Image (cartoon, grey):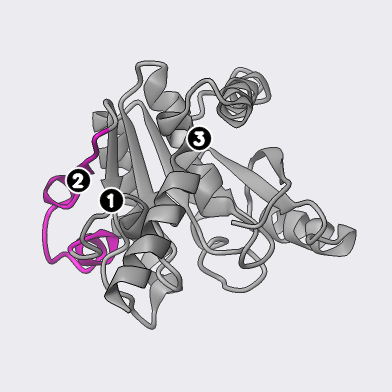
Amino acid sequence: MVRERAKIAKRIANRSLVAYLNPTHKISEQYRTIRNNIQFASDGRSIRSLIVTSPSDGDGKSTAAVNLAISMAQRGEHVLLIDANFRNPMLHKIFSAQISPGLSNVLAQQLPFAEATVETEIEGLEVLTSGLSYTNSADMLDSQTMKELIKAAEEQFDRIVIDCPPVLTAPDTNALVNKCDGVVLLLNCGKTTHSKALEAKQSLTFAGANIVGAILNKKNA
């Protein structure tokens, strides 16, 4: 059982780190293109903090967030990747890191932000895992402490990429969008219906999100 879980974890990591493990792969090239297009779509506005979300679970948004962050680090930027998906955290699995202490511990003021981030083997990329989950996760993300955390991160890092829960399954993401510079919406080809995509876009817009683009994912992740 333990060996099988280890195999599953390795498959998740290999799939999610393609931009690092195989930088010449066409998927890696596509993430670099997306990275560049985000800035082009910003109308001259600096995109320092970026949320990645999707309409539903299983769309592959964590994989997209990770590879987007890697592509930014490969450009020479100092990048922080934050797991704000308290309901289904993935980043600690992908990077074989401890889930706690993490974001929830910082928001609960149990330790300083600077002590919670973890360096990865990828040069220029650090990760802030989710920490243990709390029932009031939306309130935590909507807090003044979260706003201050993003501000502190922007002083230390060139880019902040935040992996958030699906926008249609939890209020957490909409509680955070007005604290960040932009949102990327991931859509799963063959799974995300037009109505779900439109509903997600409308929900984000109503919450005050600056949607800078969408990613069409061809495979479940």
Q: CA distance from mark 3 to mark 2?
A: 18 Å
Q: Please give the label number shown on residue 128.
A: 1
Q: Secondary structure at mark 3?
A: helix
Q: Earlier in the sequence, mark 3 or mark 1?
A: 3
Quarter of the image where one finds residue 91: bottom left
Residue at 11%, 60% (x, y): give it. 111
Q: Mark 3 highlights which residue?
A: 68
Q: Earlier in the sequence, mark 2 or mark 1?
A: 2
Q: Is residue 72 above or below residue 197?
A: above
Question: Where's residue 136, x and y in %?
Answer: 39, 79
Packing grade of label 1 (10 A; few <14, some 14-19, many >=20) is many
Question: Where's residue 130, x and y in %?
Answer: 32, 62
Q: Earlier in the sequence, mark 3 or mark 2?
A: 3
Which amino acid type corresponds to the residue marked 3 in the rendered image?
Answer: Leu
Which amino acid type corresponds to the residue marked 1 in the rendered image?
Answer: Leu
Q: Quadrant of the C terminus?
A: bottom right
In magenta stretch: residue 120? yes
Magenta highlight range: 101-121
Q: Secondary structure at mark 1?
A: strand
Residue at 69%, 41% (x, y): give it. 215
| Left or right of 70 in this view: 128 | left
Q: Mark 2 highlights which residue?
A: 118
Residue at 33%, 75% (x, y): give it. 133
